[in-house]
Image: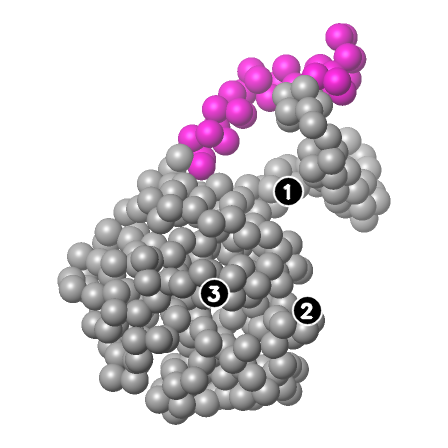
Amino acid sequence: MKISFIGAGSMAEAIIAGLIEKNICRGKDILVTNREDRAKLEQLERRYGIRPTYDMEGLIKGADIVIFAVKPKDADAVLQKIQPYIQMDTFFISVMAGISIAFMEEKLKVPCAVARAMPNTSASVGKSATAVSFNQRVSDQQKKLAATVFSSIGITAVVEENKLDAITALSGSGPAYIYYVVEAMEQSAREIGLDSNMAKQLILQTLAGAAEMLSSSDCAASELRKAVTSPGGTTEAGIEVLQRNKVEEAFIQCIKAAAEQSKRLGQIHESKHPV
C-alpha cells in the first residue's frame, strides 16, 4: 500500500507509526509533505524511513490513499494547491475537524472518492477511537483500505457524516475530559495527604481496571457503579457529593457544547471559503 500525507503533525505521525508498527506499510511507501517545516520531515525520515517531498504531483500520483492532516484553517489553501494533480481514481481521507466532505468535493473539482475521519489523540499510543464517513464514490476496496489504516491506531466505526460533530465531541475531545477527571483526583490525593507518585499509579490502575470491566462485562455502567456502592459506605458518600454538584449534568452539557462548537467551526470555515 502506498500512502501520502499532506501535513506532518502529531496525528500524521501517530498514523505513520501505527502503519509501520503493524507492518501495514513500509516507510519507503509513505510520502509526507508539509507547508515549510523541512526539519520535521527530516525527523520523520530518520525515525520511520518515510520519503519527504515537496513535489505535489509526485505525492498524489500513484498513491492508494492521500491523507489530509493539516489544520482546518489551512484546508482551503491545501485543496487548491493539489487540485491540478488530482485524478479520478485518487482516494482522499481527511482528518481535519469540521471540514465537510461536500466542501472537499467542491474544492477538489474532480469526482473522486473522499472520506472524513475523526481519530483522537490516543492514536499516539494505538488506542484511538476513530469514526469515518465516506462519499458515494468510495469503493468497497477503498473502505477496506481505510479500515486497515485506522485499525493500526485503535478501533474504527463507520458512521453517517451528520454524526461526526457528535462523535468529535464524545470521543474526539473525550480524552481531555478523562484527563480533567484525573487532574481532580490527583489534587484530591494531595489534599488528603497521599504521595503524588503513588496516587498517580493508583489512579491509572483504577482507570485501566474500570475500562476493562466496562469492556468485558455485559453490565451497564450504572449497574457496575451500583455494585460498588454499598449503602452507607464510602463510595455512596462520594457519589452523593457528585450528585449534589450535578456532575452528571455538567458532563452531558460539556459534550453537547463541544458538539455544537464542532458544527459551528465547520460553518465558520466554510462561510470564509465559499465553494
**Which residue shows up at 26% across the image and 79% down it?**
83
Q: Nearer the viewer, residue 194 or 35?
A: 35
Is 109 rendered above or below residue 229?
A: below
- Numbered disc 3: secondary structure: helix
Task: Write down the quadrant of residue 26 in the picture.
Answer: bottom right
Mark 3 / mark 1, whichever is N-terminal: 3
Is 249 rendered above or below residue 134?
A: above
Name the residue tied to disc 3: 141
Q: Main secondary structure of the magenta part?
A: helix
**Which residue shows up at 39% across the image and 86% down it?**
61
- The percent position of residue 102, horizontal first and vertical second, equals 25, 58
Q: Is residue 66 left or right of residue 203?
A: left
Q: Give the label, 1 or 2, closer to the camera.
A: 2
Name the residue tied to disc 1: 183
Q: Amino acid at mark 2?
A: Lys
Q: Quadrant of the image for the C terminus?
A: bottom left
Q: Nearer the viewer, residue 33 or 234?
A: 33
Q: Amino acid at mark 3?
A: Gln
Q: Are marks 3 and 1 in contact (CB under 8 Å)?
A: no
**Which residue shows up at 32% across the image and 57% down it?**
136
Instruction: Give the magenta-colored segment's residue range.
Output: 226-255
Total marks placed: 3
Distance, label 3 to label 1, CA atoms, is 43 Å
